[in-house]
Amino acid sequence: MVLHSPTVLAPYAGDHNVLLNVEVINRFEQFLVNDSHEALAYVQEVDHPSCRILLDTFHMNIEEDSFGDAIRRVGPYLAAFHLGETNRKTPGTGRIPWVEIKQALDDIGFDGPMVMEPCVMQGG
Ligand SMILES: [Mn+2]
């Protein structure tokens, strides 16, 4: 079986009790879904409860006008959240507005997984 379309993948994922989370990645790393507007349109077009959104603060810092507005925009479609600073270091060591992000996550009643994704290699 070839599984390449989200309209095929989402029901398949649902049948296997898996969420298909579309991670929003900045324009320099891929070209399909770069911000919360595109993610929302994509997931709404797929229109399946097993297709949801994963936001990542590292990518949001590049693409979103506002962290809080992006989180509130995707609201109930947000199923997972990646945490990292602008330079991929651990939360609290950089310039990401964590208070604003926490408030927005609380505003939408987010209770999904939050995963730190520091990707720092010594020496650059
Ligand atoms: Mn990520």
Image (tube, rainbow, N blue to C red):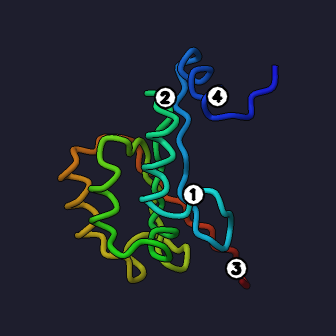
Placement of the C terminus among the 4 image quadrants:
bottom right
Answer whether labels 2 and 1 touch (C-beta < 8 Å).
no
Which quadrant of the view contains residue 27?
A: bottom right
Q: Residue at x 46, y 32 (%)?
A: 47
Identify the disc placed on residue 63. none
Q: Which residue is mark 4?
A: 9
Residue lying at the far right of the rendered structure: 1
Q: Nearest to the eye among marks 3 and 2: give it.
A: 2
Q: Residue at x 48, y 60 (%)?
A: 56
Q: Is residue 35 above or below residue 75?
A: below
Closer-to-camera residue (58/36)? 36
For badge 2, the amino acid type reads Ser
Viewport quadrant of the N terminus: top right
In-front residue for pair 8/52: 8
Please give the residue where the numbered disc 2 appears in the rendered image.
50
Q: Earlier in the sequence, mark 2 or mark 4?
A: 4
Q: Position of residue 122 (x, y in %)?
A: 70, 79
Q: Quadrant of ligand 1?
A: bottom right
Residue 97 place in picture, x, y as percent: 31, 75
Amino acid at pointer 4? Leu
Which picture quadrant has residue 76? top left
Marks 3 and 4, how far apart at CA: 37 Å
At mark 1, the secondary structure is loop
Give percent across and percent down for residue 21. Answer: 53, 41
Residue named by callout 3: 122
Residue type, numbered disc 1 = Val
Placement of 71 over or under 65, stated as above or below: above
The amino acid beneath tag 3 is: Gln
Q: Is mark 1 within 8 Å of ligand 1?
A: no
- Which residue is more in the foreground, 72 or 116? 72
User: How many angstroms separate mark 1 from mark 3 (CA)?
Assistant: 30 Å
